[in-house]
Image (cartoon, rainbow, N blue to C red):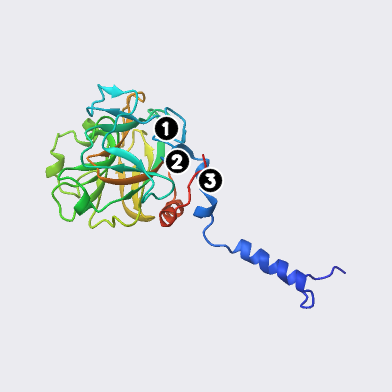
Amino acid sequence: MKTCCLRPWNPRCWILLIGAVLVIGSPHPGTAEEGLPKSLSNSLSFAATFDRDFNADFSKGDGRLYSSKTIDRKQIDQSLTAPGVARVRLGARSGEALKFTKSDPRFLFFKANKNLNYQSDRAWSGSVSYFMKLDPEKDLPDNFVDPLQITEKAWNDAAFWNDFTKDDRPRKFRLGVLADLKVWNPGNKDFDKMPDSEKPAVVVLNPPFRSDRWTHILITFEDFNTGQTNGNCSLYIDGQLQGKLTGRNQKFSWDPDKAVIFLGINYAGLMDDLMIFDRTLTSDEAAILARFRHDNQPMIHP
């Protein structure tokens, strides 16, 4: 007969059993001390921590950060020129972070091709994650502020963006997901005059941004460019779902070589750890990413 390992007179076996229970029962796999869980790191298509320089630590496409005098990018600086942006250690979430000031006259961007897994003729999904630290009421200029905007043409034509509204106090924070202009707005309505309920946007009242703590933003989207009204996208703040846009024809017609990922349009504050994933992340994965805002541990190890 085999000896039972659970006999009370075998203390070594009890120690082994307790150790196994602690390992199996450990909460929250993929904590900051471990870096990104493998399931997330395997889905990365782009990551810029800004710890070493302004360029991406990992990218499937061009990883250089560019600047332009104009938003149409007709005058692109091959070497980054950004007098109002610096990499800083003080206040960074991990390593170093980008610090934007109100005086920055340039438009900063990464090229989207291959960094964002764009598909023109079949179902396209993905996720974008980043962190911000600011007080919107004190730090931002009196203008619309887009910390993130992804587009080829314009903010209202095949574009994703987060923005802080201009005139509201407290400012609203929004996720705009605007398909081709002729698809989402065939009647050419004035976006700013549309009720929030009609806009292709998730609107957050009283968002939880503060100058003394990091706030995590996650955008997820799925089933874009299917030609059907089944496109969905979601906005998470600090791991909590803020809202969804569902049941829309999310037709995005891009020339991938011209699409870009703008950072910090009119923005003033800190930004860190921009990451793009090639699939729609789950709510549990949103919570995992949000936990990194609490500490100064790196999310990836370049």
User: Where is residue 34 drawn, in percent x and y?
Assistant: 54, 52
In the rendered image, the vertical position of residue 80 relative to residue 193, given as above or below: above
For disc 2, the marked residue is 279
Among all residues in the image, which is located at the extreme bottom?
A: 8
Q: What residue is shown at x 39% (from left), y 35% (from top)?
A: 54
User: Sequence order check: which comes first, mark 1 or mark 2?
Assistant: 1
**Mark 1 residue crowding within 10 angstroms, few (<14) / some (14–19) / many (20+):** many
Q: Amino acid at mark 2?
A: Arg
Tell whether label 3 touches label 2 (CB within 8 Å).
no
Residue type marked 1: Asn
Residue nearest the viewer, comparing 279 with 218:
218
Q: Mark 2 or mark 3, which is nearer to you? A: 3
| Residue 259 visible in image | yes
**Label 1 – label 2 distance at C-alpha:** 12 Å
Q: Which percent across, then down, holds residue 99?
A: 31, 43
User: Which element is circle 3 on?
Assistant: helix
Q: Amino acid at mark 3?
A: Ser
Picture coordinates of residue 76 (x, y %)? 29, 23
Q: Quadrant of residue 272?
A: top left
Q: In this rendering, does residue 129 appear at all? A: no
Q: Nearer the viewer, mark 1 or mark 2?
A: 1
Q: Earlier in the sequence, mark 3 or mark 1?
A: 3
Q: Are marks 3 and 1 in contact (CB under 8 Å)?
A: no
Q: For residue 263, which quarter of the picture?
A: top left
Residue, disc 3: 39
Determine the CA span between mark 3 and mark 1.
18 Å
- Residue that badge 1 annotates: 115
